[in-house]
Amino acid sequence: MSFARKWVFPILRILIFAAIAVALVKLAFFADPVEQGGEVPTGQIVDPTIPVMIGTIQNDVVLSGTVNSNPAIPVRATFGGEVIEVYVKAGKTVKKGTTVMKVRAELVNMNGTPYTRTETVKAGANGVLSSFTVLKGQQVGIGDIIGQVAPQSFNVTATIAPEQLYRLTEKPADAQVTVQGGPAPFTCTNLSIITPLPGSGGSDGSEGEGSGTTVRCSVPSDVRVFAGLVADITIAGGIAENVLVVPMTAVLGAADSGIVYVVGADGEREERPVTLGLNDGVNVEIIDGLAEGELIYQFVPGAAAGDGGGVIIDPGMEPIPFEDGEVNVEEPLK
């Protein structure tokens, strides 16, 4: 054993180091030649194309809004003079036409003779008198605000982005409203789209916080809601059936007119102006400029990769477009 330890193990170490040295010399000075005719990368950029199809565009604009109490309506004195009778007080429920006070005035005829005239002042809306501070014996003038009526009615409001106004080809009269945690969906009437005039936001001419375009509609009186509830407003902007449709990613432009890139007869890219109709945010109606079956580029040339630009594929692999515009390159050509 002492002989093996003294001579065998040192000799083995020398042989191992020698083998390593020989391998390093071979790698450094005698590398294997590159095989001729090997595989060469052949990837290329391919822009996916799709045919123009017949389809249906359901143009619904969906907005997120809130339920609000309608604003208080002022009660104004319609006759000036001394208050001689007060018939109501704050907190009382009134109807439109309810007498709230009587006013007496000492007047003079055209011939100079004096006379006394009395008039009643009435509420101009249904609701609860949220304030009414007039006192008997008080002097009031025509047009003075003597109280406020809080109507027991509600509205739904939402902000609409300016570009979404293009989707409303006709002025809508109502909308479908779904209140989160509330009753079944209902029709909200008297719909209005309000854009403040420049300078209407403040006395200094600034537009202020309310400068955006607002959609507002009235909640029916038989629907029970509360101020502050969140609601979805669905505005039907129209429907177009059996029309030419293409993805909006294929069109430069989104309303009225646009440009589509067509695969020409020679296989080259051809720029084509088109007239646009309804869109649902994903597809758009083509009114004029294309024919069914024509091949167009699915994405506007030059779009970023994340927005649907070209994808790299290998020859011999068939690109299969997915619905979201991605391309499957896993299936080989048959």
Image (spheres, rainbow, N blue to C red):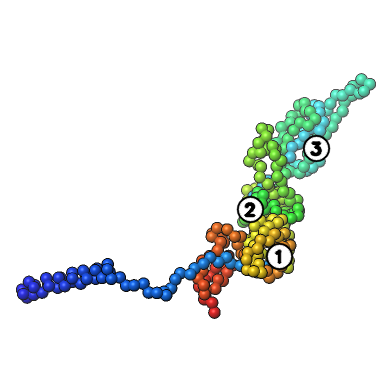
> Residue 233, which numbered label?
none
Q: Residue furthest top?
A: 112
Q: What residue do we see at 76% from left, 44% from top?
A: 126
Q: What residue do we see at 65% from left, 63% from top?
A: 270
Image position of 258 with respect to 151: above or below: below
Kind of residue at badge 2: Ser
**22 or 67: nearer the eye?**
22
Distance between the Cα atoms at labels 3 and 1?
64 Å
Residue 278 can be seen, yes or no:
no
Residue that badge 1 annotates: 290
The kind of secondary structure element at disc 3 is: strand
**69 or 253: nearer the eye?**
253
Residue that badge 3 annotates: 122
The quarter of the picture where residue 288 lies is bottom right
Q: Residue furthest left?
A: 2
Q: Are marks 2 and 3 in contact (CB under 8 Å)?
A: no
Q: What residue do we see at 54% from left, 79% from top?
A: 334
Kind of residue at badge 3: Lys
- Going from N to C along the chain, the mark reached first, 2 or 1, is 2
Residue 5: x, y in percent? 8, 72
Task: Say left or right for 34 vs 288.
Answer: left
Residue 209 can be seen, yes or no:
yes
The quarter of the picture where residue 168 lies is bottom right
> Residue 64, which numbered label?
2
